[in-house]
Every structure is written in C-alpha cells, then in structure tokens.
Amino acid sequence: MPSATALAAQPDPMRVAYLDTLISLGRHLEFYDPTGVRFGLPTYPFKWAPTHLATRRQLRNQQLRPGGQPITGQILWRHRGTLRVAYLYDVNHAKTKRAATPAQLVAIRKALRARCTCTTCGAIKPYYIPRSLGECLDCAPGGA
Ligand SMILES: [Zn+2]
C-alpha cells in the first residue's frame, strides 16, 4: 500500500491539534482557519498560532527579521468592536537581525565624516561635499 498512513501520521504544522479537537467536538471557532479558505490566509485566534509562526515583533524579540519572506498567516481578534490583525512569518525562514557592530558603527561615522571633508582644503564642513564639485563650496570656483 502507498504511504497513506505515513502521511496521516505526519501532523500538518499549520494546524493546531487542540483547536482541531474543539472543532471535532462541535465548537465554532470564528478565527481558526488553518487552510485560509475563509480569510485568504491561514488564520488563528489570538495566542493560538502554531509555534513556528511569529509576528514581526516576536521575531525582533528573538533578534530575527522576516528577511523578505511572504506573510505566512495571520492572527485575527476583536478589540473594542473592531477587527484587529497581526501578520505572521515562518520562524524557519527568518533571518538574523542585522545589528551594526561597534566596528561597523566606527566605519559608518568615518564614511560620513569623509563625505563632509573637503579634499582641497581638508576642512570638515557641516554639509556633504557636492560630488559635482569635488570640493567644498569655499574652494569651488564661483563658490560662496
Ligand atoms: Zn575646501
């Protein structure tokens, strides 16, 4: 026989077993839609998303970012009569957050200061040296 039993044994990561149990017991869960047939995206009630899905804020708390991946699901809930949504991303496809290291910060400041330094007189100006002139406004012919 084909591996139908093996497939059945593999739980669908987009489903929440407890919520499936409630549905099988006849409960109607307005915001549980793991296939997205009703809402267009896999949808979960507040606090009931599968563990591998996280909001942007939850990713940030783990030093992660979505990293260009599409939205994988959403949490829907009502707050004071209005429908609220939080988009979910797959933690497995998240990338580590790019935080500048101290060395990178030094390099960034150096680069910014270089852009303000006139190559002709060497003065550090409070503005970026115009690329078209290649020197500060005092040195450029016809400058201030
Ligand atoms: Zn100059």
Image (tube, rainbow, N blue to C red):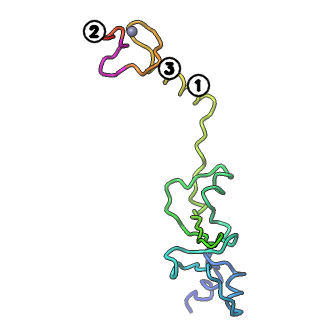
Q: Are marks 2 and 1 in contact (CB under 8 Å)?
A: no
Task: Inspect the image, locate mark 3, and give the three-letter code of the amino acid beneath it.
Answer: Arg
Q: Estimate the x, y position of residue 123 in percent, counting from the top left.
A: 45, 9
Q: CA distance from mark 3 to mark 2?
A: 23 Å
Residue 132 colored magenta? yes
Q: Earlier in the sequence, mark 1 or mark 3?
A: 1
Against 82, is 23 above or below? Answer: below
Q: Estimate the x, y position of residue 134 in percent, counting from the top left.
A: 33, 16
- The image quadrant of residue 74 is bottom right
Look at the image and give the residue range highlighted in magenta.
Answer: 130-137
Residue 144 colored magenta? no
Extreme residue in the front direction: 80
Q: In front: mark 3 or mark 2?
A: 2
Q: In front: mark 2 or mark 1?
A: 2
Which residue lies at the image location 66% right of the left edge and 57% below the top edge?
Answer: 58
Which residue lies at the image location 52% right of the left edge and 73% below the top edge?
Answer: 41
Q: Mark 3 = which residue?
A: 113
Secondary structure of the residue carrying numbered label 3: helix
- The image quadrant of residue 94 is bottom right
Residue nearest the viewer, comparing 12 with 51: 51
Secondary structure of the residue carrying numbered label 1: helix
Q: Estimate the x, y position of residue 118 in percent, counting from the top left.
A: 41, 12
Task: Inspect the image, locate mark 2, and give the three-letter code of the amino acid beneath it.
Answer: Pro
Q: CA distance from mark 1 to mark 3?
A: 11 Å
Q: Mark 1 = which residue?
A: 106
Extreme residue in the top direction: 121
Q: Mark 2 = which residue?
A: 141
Q: CA distance from mark 2 to mark 1?
A: 33 Å
In the drawing, does residue 121 fall left or right of residue 59? Answer: left
Around disc 2, counting alpha carbons within 10 Å, would you say few (fewer than 14), some (14 to 19), or many (20 or more)? few
Ligand 1 falls in quadrant: top left
Q: Quadrant of the C terminus?
A: top left
